[in-house]
Image: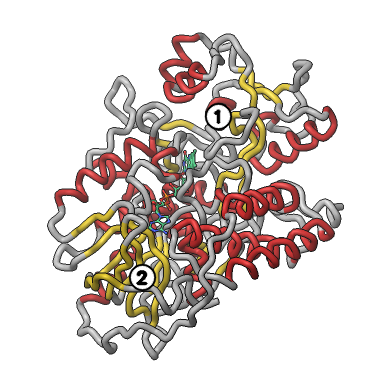
Amino acid sequence: MQFAIDGTTKISQTLRYDVVIIGAGLAGLYTALHIGERHSCLILAKDKIDISNSWFAQGGIAAAISSDDAPIFHLEDTLIAGAGLCDKDAVGVLVDEGPTDISRLVSLSVPFDIDEFGDLQITREGGHRKNRIVHAGGDATGRETVKALAHIVAQRGNISFSENTCFYDILKDKNGAVSSIIVKKDDKDFHLIETRHVVIATGGIGQVYRSTTNPSVATGDGLAAAMRAGAEIKNIEFIQFHPTGLWSPVPEDREFLISEAVRGEGGLLKNRDGVRFMEGAHELNELAPRDIVARAVVKELQRSGDDHVFVDITAKSEDFLKKRFPTIYEECLKRGINIAHDWIPVCPVQHYLMGGIATDTNGRTSIPGLYAAGEAANTGVHGANRLASNSMLECLVFGRRAAEDISRALEQPASGEKPVLPHVQTRPKAALDYTALRQRIKDLMSEYGYVMRNAEGLRYAIGEVTEILRQVEAVYDDAVVYLETLNIATVALAILTAALNRPESIGSHYREDTAV
Ligand SMILES: Cc1cc2nc3c(=O)[nH]c(=O)nc-3n(C[C@H](O)[C@H](O)[C@H](O)COP(=O)(O)OP(=O)(O)OC[C@H]3O[C@@H](n4cnc5c(N)ncnc54)[C@H](O)[C@@H]3O)c2cc1C
C-alpha cells in the first residue's frame, strides 16, 4: 500500500515550508533549533507537547564528560551492549560529539542537576563502566529538557509549531525525492504541505504492544509512512523490553516506569517469597543488561504463575527516595505504594525500538529529502541492544547533524518540480471496530513478539496480523484512529517478519526455539 489517504481525501489548504519536522520530542525540537534561521521550519505534534517519550524520560543523558572518562570508553560500552550489531562509525560520531551537545544544552538553559560545587551531577547506569549520565529534576530529565528547548523554539522567528496535527503520507516527485506531505489538523482538515525536506522524528512504536512505557502517540506513524513511501527499514526486530514497568492489574494506556536507577541505588528484584532470583543469573545481579533481567523476570513469572515480581528499595530512607526519585515516589504513593516501606510490583514492558528508518550519520534516509532522527531512526548506534541513556544522546547528535545537512542543502538553488497530488485509488468507505483490531494486534505481539519468541508463534502471529492488515487496507476511513490502526498493523507485521527471519538470538532478540 502506497498511501493511507485515498482518492476522495479533500485538501482544504496548501502550505509551504523549507523544512517540516514531524515530532516535538527531543529529536524534533533539537533538530529545529539547528536549522539555519533563514529557513522556514514547521514542527508538527500529533497531540500536545507533553505527550512524547522524551517528556516521560526519567534517568538522563549519557556522555563522556567526567574527568576519568573518555569517548573511547563510552564507545566500548556501547559496542558491548549492541552485541556486535552497532555501526562503529556511527557510535564514534555519537560518543565524540555527544559532550559538545550536552554543553549546548547547558547553554540553552536546560536545568541539569548540579552538585554542591556547581558542577553537573554525573551518575552511572547499567552497562556503563564510568559515571556519565547527566539528569535534571532528579528523575524528570526528559520533561525538563523538552520544556527548556520548547521555550527557545517558541522565540525563534523561523519556526512554527502546530499541535494536534497528524502526519499521514509522504509524496514524492517523479525523481523519487520528497515533494510534500499530507497532514490532518485537529482530526478535521487535510493539508498539503509543500516541502523538499522532511524529518521524521515521530518516536517509538510502543502502542503496538499491550504494555508499554510509551504514550498514546507512539503508534509508529513515521515508520509506517516511510515504509509506504519505500524507505529502507532496519533492525526492527530489536525491541527493548524494560524489566521493571510498574505493574497494574489492568494494562494502562502507558505503564509507569520504575527506572533502572532505582536498582542502581540498591533496589533488589524479589519474587513474592522475597527470593532474589537475579542472584546467580548474572554476575551483575539486578544490574545485568536489561534484556537479561527481562528474560529472568519472564522465566520467574512462568515458574511461579504470578503476573509480577517486586523491586525492594526499602533499605533507603524516605527522605533520600523523595529527593532522588520524586516522580517515582509520588506516582507510587498515588497508587497506595510507599516505596520507602512497600515493595514495588513490576513486570517487563515494551520500552524502546532499537531499529527504525535506516539513516546515514547525517540523518539521510534512502529517499532523497527524507531524514529521520531520534527513536524513529536506525542510525546504527544501538545495534541489538541500547545502552541506557544513549537514546536521548542520539536524538541530540544526529538531530543536529540532520539539521546541519538540511541547512547546507537549502543553501543550494532549489530544484524539482511543483508537487502534484498523485493518483490515489479510492477504497470503499467503512468504519471498522478499531478498538477490537488494535487489541487483537497488541495481544498477538505481547504473546508472540515479546521477550521470548519462537518460529511457530511468530508464523501464527504473522498470519493473524496479515489478515487484519488486509481488512484495514481494503477500506478507507478519514479518522485518525483508522490511520493509527493501519500503522500499528503495518509495524507489527514488519517486527514479526524480521523476528522470524532472524533465527539466532542476539541482544534483545531472543529465539527460544534456536537458543543453545
Ligand atoms: C518512560 C521512559 C523513560 C525513558 N528514559 C530514558 C532515559 O532516561 N534516557 C534516555 O536516553 N532515554 C530514555 N527513554 C527513551 C527516550 O526517551 C526516547 O527514545 C527519546 O526521547 C525519543 O525521542 P524522539 O524525539 O525520537 O521521540 P518522542 O519524544 O517520542 O517524540 C515523538 C513526537 O512525534 C510526534 N508524532 C508521532 N506521530 C505523529 C504523527 N503521525 N504526526 C505528527 N506528530 C507525530 C509525537 O506527537 C511526539 O511529539 C525513555 C523512554 C520512556 C518512554
- Coloring applied to the structure: secondary structure
SS for dot 1: loop
Cβ(mark 2) to ligand 1 < 8 Å? Answer: no
**Residue 182 image label:** 2
Q: Residues within 10 Å of mark 2 (few under 14, many from 20)?
A: many
Residue 498 position in % (x across, y down) = 68, 65
Residue 311 position in % (x across, y down) = 64, 22
Residue 412 position in % (x across, y down) = 22, 81
Cβ(mark 1) to ligand 1 < 8 Å? Answer: no
> Position of 23 compared to 320: left or right?
left
Q: Which residue is mark 1?
A: 258
> Position of 491 compared to 104: left or right?
right
Q: Name the amino acid type tagged 2.
A: Ile
Q: Residues within 10 Å of mark 1 (few under 14, many from 20)?
A: many
Say whether residue 490 is visible.
yes
Residue 66 position in % (x across, y down) = 40, 37
Q: Residue at x 28, y 88 (%)?
A: 416
Say whether residue 78 is visible.
no
**Residue 339 image label:** none
Which mark lies nearer to you, 2 or 1? 2
- Which residue is nearer to you in this view: 418 or 32? 418
Q: Residue at x 65, y 70 (%)?
A: 470
Q: Residue at x 36, y 78 (%)?
A: 178
Q: Residue 51 falls in which quadrant of the image?
A: top left
- Which residue is nearer to you in this view: 75 or 144? 144
Q: Name the amino acid type tagged 1.
A: Ile
- Measure how far apart labels 2 and 1 are at the Cα level: 38 Å
Mark 2 and mark 1 lie on one chain; the one further toward the N terminus is 2
Q: Residue 43 falls in which quadrant of the image?
A: bottom left
> Position of 72 compared to 140: left or right?
right
SS for dot 2: strand
